Image: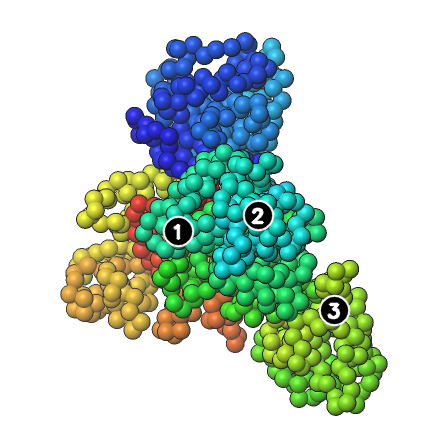
Amino acid sequence: MPPAETPPAPYPRHWEADVIASDGGLVHLRPILPTDAQRLLDFHARLSDRTRYLRFFGPYPRISPRDLERFTVVDHRRRVAFVCLVDDEIVAVGRYEGLPGDGGQAPPESAEVAFVARDDHQGRGLGSILLEHLAAAARENGLQRFEAEVLVENHAMVRVFRQAGYQVKRAFTEGVLHLEFDIDPTEASLAVRHAREQRAEARSVHNLLHPRSVAVIGASADPSKIGHAVFTNLLRANPAGPVYPVNPEARSVRGVRAYPSVTDIPDDVDLAVVAVPAAGIDEVMDSCRAKGVHGLVVISSGFADAGGGGTLAQARLVAEARAHGMRVVGPNALGIANTDPSVRLNATLAPILPGRGRVGFFSQSGALGTAILATAAERGLGLSTFVSAGNRADVSGNDLLQYWQTDPATDVVLLYLETFGNPRKFARVARRLARTKPIVAVKSGRHTGPVPGLATAAVSIDEQSVAALFEQSGVVRVATLTQMFDTALLLAYQPLPAGSRVAVVGNSTAIGVLAVDGLVGEGLEPLGEPVDVGAGASPEEFAAAVTKAAQDGAADALVVVFVPPIAKPGAAYARAVREAVNGSGKPVVAVFLAAEGVPAELAVTGPDGSPLRGSVPSYPSPERAVAALARVTRYARWRAQPVGEFVDPPGIDREQAHDLVQQEIGGIDLAPDGPAARRLDDATARRLLRAYGVEIVDYHRVGDEDAAVAAAEGLGMPVVVKAVGDLWRHRTDAVGVRTDLGHETAVREAYTAITAITGEPEVYVQRMAPQGISCVLAIVDDPSFGSLLSFGLSGLATELLGDRAFRVVPVSDRDAAALVRAPRAAPLLEGYRGTQPVQMEALEDLVLRVGRFAEDLPEVRSLALDPVIASADGVFVAGARIVVGPPAARDDTGPRRLL
């Protein structure tokens, strides 16, 4: 949302933010302006005497003209003030004032901080929000610490500082607490910020999904209108609260009294479902704002999905909604649903919802939403909540992940994604959620790239980035909606396997063998040959064999295959299987041919007939059953691993590295026709890497044959002579490199041969690293969310097959260990066919250092350590290329904000 007035003096625009308060409502935060004088007077007048006393340490009924100017005119450097606004009214103010440096001459390193919230907005976490944003601004301005003077009885203010995650020093004098703390982020302060963010965003989604009343703006009696469909579906769900149709041209809709405007409804309205043309959205927003509606679900299309003016209309819609504390689902959304018996909400265009269940579903596509819901109902997959966000102008998949993190009604999360709005945040939130609740995701556009007409502010991410994002976050990725439902059924109704050993029991050897083949192909371990009870076995005999397999301590999971015998009903066999595996504690998948989903005979049902945990999912083929089991097994393996730690390797000098990068950035021409980035020279690259504890094997750059010999003698034989140009040095035929040169003649011959090929007089002479395996570790710049780490072994086969692994920054110690073991050629590093293994710990340490390097220095657009020689003696970096440039935006850094 733009500021109310254009400031007379510029301030960093990224200091403006829409932020979710702890109650789920929205506030707009921005620097204070001189034109806020009257707003500030009104704000102060609405403070209670007690609040004024606690803030100003005494009676302060009115702000004097002198103080008013001092409060509203700031320089945005030594003196910074932020205001929180709702409906264009100031509801909270926070500020810092720089304290004099040494002798009053030096720039300040400390500032005094204070904030106050209007009484009717206290308890919403606004003090914590202001502190986060003030600390971020202060760090940008070179400050290192905050100080605060707080009355000892001001418990709320003391609690804000105490719970912020900083190391706070305290001193007490005459009823006043003096607090002092460094404002650099700490693990504790980041954990506090993320926890508060999760609670606030979860609350905002909870408010949308648990409305006490709903208005349908554009409700219609015309069956061809979307307003008719959504209003009918709301009524059919028998919601717990009232539903009001809004239609200025109708007295009633489906027998329910209609109102000309939402403002005419006599009771409060929590949620408005908008089903009017995009051209009428401004009038709708005005009425919803006046009514105090808390959330909007915009079913209408014609916004960013239509392009042109629709994009501007969508931006205006979101800005207006946020300015008045409302969240928006859509536009172009299918709607939202909540099957909780105390809510019973179906604010969607889908006439049929699946039964009550414990699966949360987010779909970015409105067009697919109806088919998704119908398929879920058909296959017996119950849902807890469903959100189709359409254009995803405000509420996104990340918001739903935050909600489902603590939603006691949801055990499994399903995502259908077309794009990512904030991939870095997705990685962080999904990684945390997947530790307790599995996430299954379909990401469309794997091979097509950006799809024309997709209405979203997000950027497209290439396939390798998506794969790294999902793998690192523990997300179960599937290629199709069919695979999603196959996997979700197993996760929803069966326990996770403890391992990969699987028993197969059935009444058909042929189908059993197919199941075993599938297990082997998916990397699972069949327990011997499949057990075949024969086509003539009775239900009791079939159940006995299943029971025996389920009770076998060597089995971690069970596949039951069944071909209905002639003249024998299969229902009795299904019931027998269900009873046989009940309480086994092991996942069971069934292949009852011609049965898909959860047949009634395999289901454990609740009072409403919906399948419950313990139901046995059935698949129409052994291949699909085994594939679903394999995905769940891989997820269980990931979840059983210890949580990685984001460690800080020793010996890092961030200050030196930052200064070096800023010097280089300062020399880049940022004009439109200037270069966007610059490659660092050898000396600077070496100093920058050394600041992060990464040493390059000693070398000299020389320009003639005698100098090459002298350099070799100085370094100590044997040496390597390499061409200066990357084109020659990194060719797979090694034409630009001569290794293991142990005497003067060899050095001279190498110099002559290389310069004759390249036509350049200069070469590198480098000390020979120990023999080992050549690898490449790189930072790859992704425009959507910053940096990826790439690792692979060197060589033609690696390049031909694309055998490289990727991880999203930041990387934990577990990520580092997984990255160096992920390429298909990685077994060569750990000793293959009797070869000596390399020091994997040293390789992991290098990955952690480069990951920290990428996270701390967003100005580094690319880095290639090539080659990295991994050996039993350690890891040796023999070459490095670094390119720096203006940093790309990182949407998941800094204080809390909505994008």
Tell me the quarter of the image containing the C terminus.
top left
The residue mark sitting in front, 2 or 3, is 2
Give the amino acid type for the residue marked by disc 1 in the picture. Phe
Tell me the quarter of the image containing the N terminus.
top left
Residue located at (62% from left, 60% from top): 353
Q: Position of residue 857 (x, y in %)?
A: 38, 45
Q: For the view shown, which residue lies furthest in the right direction?
A: 540
Residue located at (46% from left, 64% from top): 444
The residue mark sitting in front, 1 or 3, is 1
Q: Who is closer to the viewer here, 246 or 852? A: 246
- Marked residue nearer the N-terminal end (2 or 3): 2
**From the viewer's perspective, is 257 left or right of 699?**
right
Quarter residue 527 falls in: bottom right
In the depicted structure, whether residue 627 falls above or below residue 406:
below
Q: Which mark is residue 377?
A: none
Give the amino acid type for the residue marked by disc 3 in the picture. Ala
Q: Secondary structure at mark 3?
A: loop
Q: Which residue is mark 1?
A: 303
- Marked residue nearer the N-terminal end (1 or 2): 2
Q: Which mark is residue 603?
A: 3
- Marked residue nearer the N-terminal end (1 or 3): 1
Q: Who is closer to the viewer here, 324 or 360? A: 324
Give the amino acid type for the residue marked by disc 2 in the picture. Ser
Mark 3: few/some/many CA within 10 Å (<14, 14-19, 20+): many
Quarter residue 730 falls in: bottom left
Q: Which mark is residue 252?
A: 2
Q: Is residue 472 visible?
A: no
